[in-house]
Image: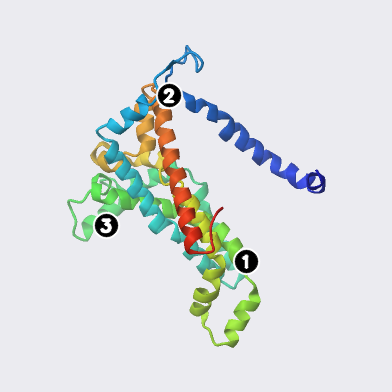
Amino acid sequence: MKRWKADKYLYLMALPGMLYFVVFHYFPMWGIVIAFQDYNPFQGVMHSDWIGFEHFSRLFRHPDFWLILRNTLVISLLNIVFFFPAPIVLALLLNEIRTAMFKKSIQTVVYLPHFVSWVVICSMTISLMNSDGLLTKLVHAIGYPQLQLLMDKSLFWGIITVQSIWKDAGWGTIIFLAALAGINPDLYESAKVDGANRWQQTVHITLPCVMNTIVILLILRLGQVMNISFDQLYIMGNPLVKEVAEVFDTYVYQAGVLQGNFSYATAVGIFKSAVGFVLILTANMISKKTSEHYLF
C-alpha cells in the first residue's frame, strides 16, 4: 500500500494500458472454450455441444496443414534473419550521425512507412510489379522477358520480406536508439584513448551494451513466428502463388470466418498461440543457460 500511495500517479498513467490488456486480451480468453465445442451462435457458449479435440484433429488431418505450416515458418524465418537485424543496423547508422537536424530528418523519413497501411503498400507494390509496372519493365529490359514478378512463386517470399523491411525497419529503430542513448559516453572516450576506431568501438562497446535489448526482443519475436500480417498476405496473394502464400491467418479467414466455423478458427488460433508459447519458453531457457541475457 505504501508503494501504491507513493507511485499512485505512475499507476494512474499505466491504467489505460492495463485496461486495454484486461478488456481486449484477458477477458476474451474465456471464449477459447468454443474450440472444444460445436459452437452454435443461437445456442451460445453454455449450450453448444461439447466435442473435445475434434477441431484440432481436423486441423492436423487437413491435407494442406503441412504446406500452411511450412509457409508460415519460412516467412517468419525470413523475417527473423533479414527483417529483425535491419532496425539494429539502421539504428547503429543513425547513431553515427552527428548533425542533429540531419539525423532527425532521416529518422522522420524512415518512420513514415510505418504509418502507411498495408493496403496502400501492397497496392503500390502491385502497381510497380504488374505486367505493365515499372519494375516489371526494368526486369524485361535487362533480359528476363518471361518473368512475371507477382506470379512467380520463387519470388513471393522475397517480395513479402522486402515489404516488411521497408515498412517497419525504421519504426523498429526507436527501441534500439533508446538503448544506444543509455550507453555511458566515458566508454567511448576510453576506447578512443586506447586507439580504437569507430568499427572497434561498435563491436566492443555498442553491441555488448545493447545485447540485452536485442536478445529480449528476439525472444519475444520468436513467440510471434506463427503470426503473419494477414492484410499483407491476403492482398499480395493470388491463385498462382497460393501454394507459397497460404498461411494460418489467411487459412483461418477462408476456412473459419467466411464459412462460419468459429470453433475451428478458434482451435487454429489456440494451436498458433501454443507454438509461440513453447518457442518463447525454449528460447528463454537456452538464452538463460548460454548467456546473461534472458527475459525471465
Mark 1 surroundings within 10 Å by alpha-carbon count, few (fewer than 14), some (14 through 19), many (20 or more)? few
Quarter of the image for residue 67 reads top left
- Rounded to the nearest angstrom, the CA distance separating label 1 from label 3 is 42 Å
Using residue 51 as the reference point, say whether residue 87 is left or right of it.
right
In the figure, 24 relative to 262: above or below? below
Mark 3: give few (<14), some (14-19) or many (20+) Cα within 10 Å: few
Which comes sooner in the sequence, label 1 or label 2? 2
Q: Which-is-in-front pick, marks 1 and 2?
A: 2
The image position of residue 267, as x and y in percent, is 41, 30
Please name the residue shown 54% across and 27% down the image.
30
Q: Kindly report the distance in space between the C-alpha atoms of the residues bearing marks 1 and 2.
A: 49 Å
Q: Residue at x 49, y 74 (%)?
A: 203
Q: Which residue is mark 3?
A: 138
The percent position of residue 118, horizontal first and vertical second, equals 44, 43
Left or right? Give the position of 281 relative to 140: right
Secondary element at image label 1:
helix
Pointer 2 residue: 36
Residue at screen point 24% across, 46% down: 153
- Whether residue 50 appears in this view of the structure is yes
Q: Amino acid at mark 3?
A: Leu
Dot label at residue 181? 1
- Give the residue type that dot 2 points to: Phe
Going from the N terminus, do you reach mark 3 or mark 2 first?
A: 2
Please state which amino acid type lies under the numbered disc 1: Ala
| Residue at the extreme front | 289
Per the model, the C-alpha gap separating discs 3 and 2 is: 53 Å
Q: Nearer the viewer, mark 1 or mark 3?
A: 1
Q: In what element is the residue under mark 3?
A: helix
Q: What SS does tag 2 mark? A: helix
